[in-house]
């Protein structure tokens, strides 16, 4: 690895930095975006049970809000459970937008790395081609400079694609995962609104 870095030179450093950031973001999002952590399966049933037994006490609402992202959405509804249906829905939607924004944290950076890595590889290819042409002198080609130019061109292109492909796969995976969380939270929030206003049985 050190031999490759030494052979390619400075054009490989931005790619190495991008790869380190991409791996860190993929690990962080994989740990954070777990279904059991975002939309716990039994939370809504417990909230409805507490709502029927003791009503929306401030302690219960704070406990639900601190539980999970879904809990934040449900807590927004519980704070407005005595308000008209539309006001309760608006409070849930406003909190839901903030929750989705938090879930999408770092995804823009990961998507940017997936997009620019091939371009950084292409930049390395161009630099390598410049070195190749510069190696051609009047007395013939300089073998060391020619070899370095080929190394820069090939290694940077390959590394750029190696970084971009997994980054794009994980970026699309996390986007799809968040979309499924949003649908799940919407359905559970609607059920809370309908049960609270007597339109549906728990």
Image (cartoon, rainbow, N blue to C red):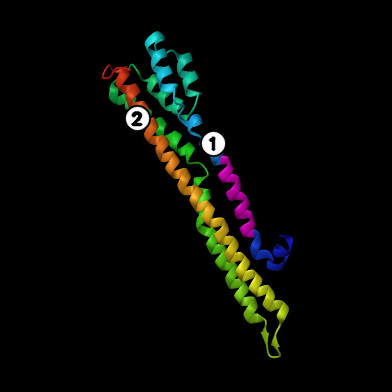
Q: CA distance from mark 1 to mark 2?
A: 22 Å
Residue at the spot x=38%, y=23% of the render? 77
Queried whether the magenta region covers residue 101, the answer comes back as no
Q: Is residue 138 left or right of residue 181?
A: right
Q: Secondary structure at mark 1?
A: helix
Queried whether the magenta region covers residue 23, the answer comes back as yes
Viewer-proximal residue among 90 and 104:
104
Query: What is the quadrant of the C terminus in the image?
Result: top left
Viewer-proximal residue among 97 and 71:
71
> Label 2, on which residue?
187
In the rendered structure, which segment of residues is drawn in magenta? Answer: 14-28
| Residue 91 visible, this orientation | no
> Label 1, on which residue?
32
Query: What is the quadrant of the N terminus in the image?
Result: bottom right
Viewer-proximal residue among 123 and 140:
140
Quadrant of residue 184 within the rendered picture? top left
Q: Is residue 7 above or below residue 68?
A: below
């Amino acid at each position: 690895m050190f031999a490759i870095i030494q052979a390619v030179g400075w054009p490989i450093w931005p790619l190495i930095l991008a790869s380190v950031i991409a791996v860190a973001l993929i690990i962080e999002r994989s740990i954070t975006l777990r279904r059991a952590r975002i939309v716990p399966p039994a939370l809504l049933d417990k909230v409805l049970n507490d709502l029927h037994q003791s009503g929306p006490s401030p302690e219960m609402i704070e406990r639900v809000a601190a539980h999970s992202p879904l809990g934040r959405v449900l807590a927004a509804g519980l704070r407005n459970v005595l308000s008209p249906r539309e006001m309760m829905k608006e409070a849930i939607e406003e909190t839901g937008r903030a929750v989705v924004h938090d879930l999408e944290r770092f995804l823009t950076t990961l998507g940017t790395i997936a997009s620019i890595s091939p371009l950084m590889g292409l930049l390395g290819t161009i630099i390598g081609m410049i070195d190749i042409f510069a190696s051609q002198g009047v007395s013939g080609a300089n073998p060391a400079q020619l070899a370095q130019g080929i190394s820069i061109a090939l290694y940077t292109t390959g590394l750029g694609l190696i970084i971009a492909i997994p980054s794009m796969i994980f970026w699309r995976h996390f986007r799809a995962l968040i979309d499924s969380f949003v649908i799940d939270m919407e359905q559970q929030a609607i059920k809370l609104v309908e049960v609270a206003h007597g339109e549906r049985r728990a």
